[in-house]
Image (cartoon, rainbow, N blue to C red):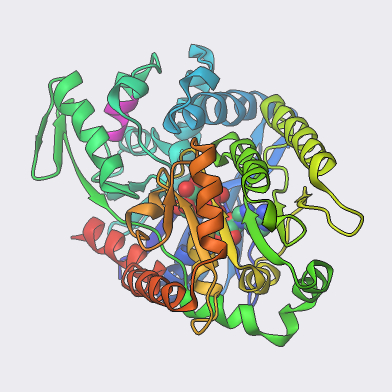
Amino acid sequence: MSRLVVVSNRVAPITEGQPTSGGLAAGVMDALRAKGGIWFGWSGEVVEGEAGPAREQRVGAIQLHTIDLNRRDYEDYYRGFANDTLWPTLHYRPSLARFDWKEYEGYQRVNAIFARAVAPLLQPDDIVWAHDYHLFGFAEALHAEGVTNRIGIFLHTPFPAPQVFMTIPAHEALARSLCHFDLVGFQTETDRLALEDYIAREIAGDVAGHVLCAFGREARTGVYPIGVQVDECRAQAIRADNQKAAVRLRSSVAERRLIMSVDRLDYSKGLRQRFLAFEKFLEDFPAARNEVTFLQIAPPSRGDITTYQEIRAELEAEAGRINGRFADLDWVPLRYLNRGFAREELMPMYAAAQVGLVTPLRDGMNLVAKEYVAAQDPADPGVLVLSQFAGAARELNAALVVNPFDTVGLAKALDQALTMPREERRSRHADMIRVMRENSLDRWRDRFVADLAG
Ligand code: ADQ
């Protein structure tokens, strides 16, 4: 029987019987549990000197293989090319990117290290599923090891317009690497079209029937919007054991309405613009003062990287300024919590919020938007205010779709959300749930795996 071999930058910590966090982890874990298989990736450990061989751990039918990275590989591959070049560029922010050929070589070197460790684990029928922008070079590296298995990649981030992609000096080499995959999967049609456009117009490849022909290779493309487990989100939202944080939140907010946002602290998420829009809302709709609280949860991510430290300082300053301007004796308008919560604690908090405010400047999908909708009480649901630049907006057009750069428009959308009649909220919510059930997390995975195997 063919096994699934999943390769991602990190392997999520897994304990048997425990719920997994995040879309990728939850989605692939179910498939691995059912079919048996391997999950390979970095352990998250950085070692001084040379990294040792991969470690193996068995959890039920799943074999987890992890390797450490040495300091140089971590700096060049992870901090350097993946996070300081690819991440900003893929999110349409080339002005935040830097490029260094040495880091690019380090990126391809780590892809080759991954490939050398994975190749001996493979059986002839196995299919290999790589995840995300860390692994553009992985199929090419596996081919160099003589592997002939089917290999696919799913890109969790956006893929940018050709002129943006081409700001990376190594763009052509990266495109060649991508063409080594049998299947390249995207979150939205826009992302797929961007790569197809680049291949057809910029490097004179052929694109027919969603097959890329370039560099002497053929790669199929597909669109697989990632989803959430809709019923599980709602079940967690109402489960008695999960209510502790939500109860504290509700009692502190008292009778006021709640706007809620949850993000990793990242410049792609549009937090500053969102804070300014909330300020504009309080300015333009004075009746909302002391009636509405905005809760932003944003734990630090990749905290050792300077840009992230800067965002953090900037947001703390903005939150302080806005609160200084509007707070009252018994009301703090904007609560900014620089810490994470377990997913099962977040779901009841989502259910307690009248508005889910999800306004990234760019996002591959944004699962928080889908989790917020799934967690709502269908009889009296909250309203999702969603950026047009999140992949999720392609499916969730029954949300209030906004331009995150339009402060005035966003402030108006907040007012519309907070005053929306229940019938309209119910009907929009039902539309979104219908789409989310169609594009469930299981369907995302099953369609990708079927297309790769077929
Ligand atoms: P992320 O950029 O991490 O993921 P997102 O999809 O919003 O973005 O979140 C992933 C998961 O992390 C969600 O399940 C969410 O609940 C959880 N999470 C986020 N912030 C949290 C917080 N403050 N505390 C606790 N949990 C939190 C990348 C891409 C996205 C894409 C996903 C999946 O950038 O565009 O949707 O992969 O493909």
Q: Is residue 11 left or right of residue 115?
A: right
- Image-quadrant location for residue 450: bottom left
Q: Is residue 171 above or below residue 237?
A: above
Q: Which residue occupies 44% across, 38% down?
A: 133
Identify the residue at the far front of this view: 287
Query: Residue sitting at 52 percent across and 49 percent down?
Result: 412
Name the spot of residue 389 as percent of width and height, x first: 41, 43
| Residue 323 position in % (x across, y down) | 81, 44
Q: Going by the picture, which residue comes out furthest to the right?
A: 329
For the N terminus, the quadrant is bottom left
Q: Nearer the viewer, residue 103 or 290?
A: 290
What residue sits 63% from the left and 65% below the top?
A: 14
The quarter of the picture where residue 5 lies is bottom left
In the rendered image of this protein, does residue 62 appear above or below residue 397? below
Task: Relative to 233, say whether 221 is above or below.
Answer: above
Magenta-drawn stretch, dominant element (helix, strand or loop): helix
> Hey, which quadrant is residue 325 in on the image?
top right
Tell me if residue 159 is in the magenta stretch: no
Residue sitting nearer the eye, 49 or 411: 411
Residue 195 point in image, percent of width and height: 26, 33
Asked if one can make out residue 244 in the rendered structure from this viewpoint, the answer is yes
The structure residue drawn at horizontal position 68% and vertical position 64%, both measured from the top left corner, is: 258
Query: Front-most of 168 and 161?
Result: 161
Q: Is residue 10 visible?
A: no
Quadrant where the C terminus lies?
Answer: bottom left
| Magenta-drawn segment | 174-178
How many numbered circles does the render carry? 0
Which x, y percent locates residue 227?
A: 41, 64
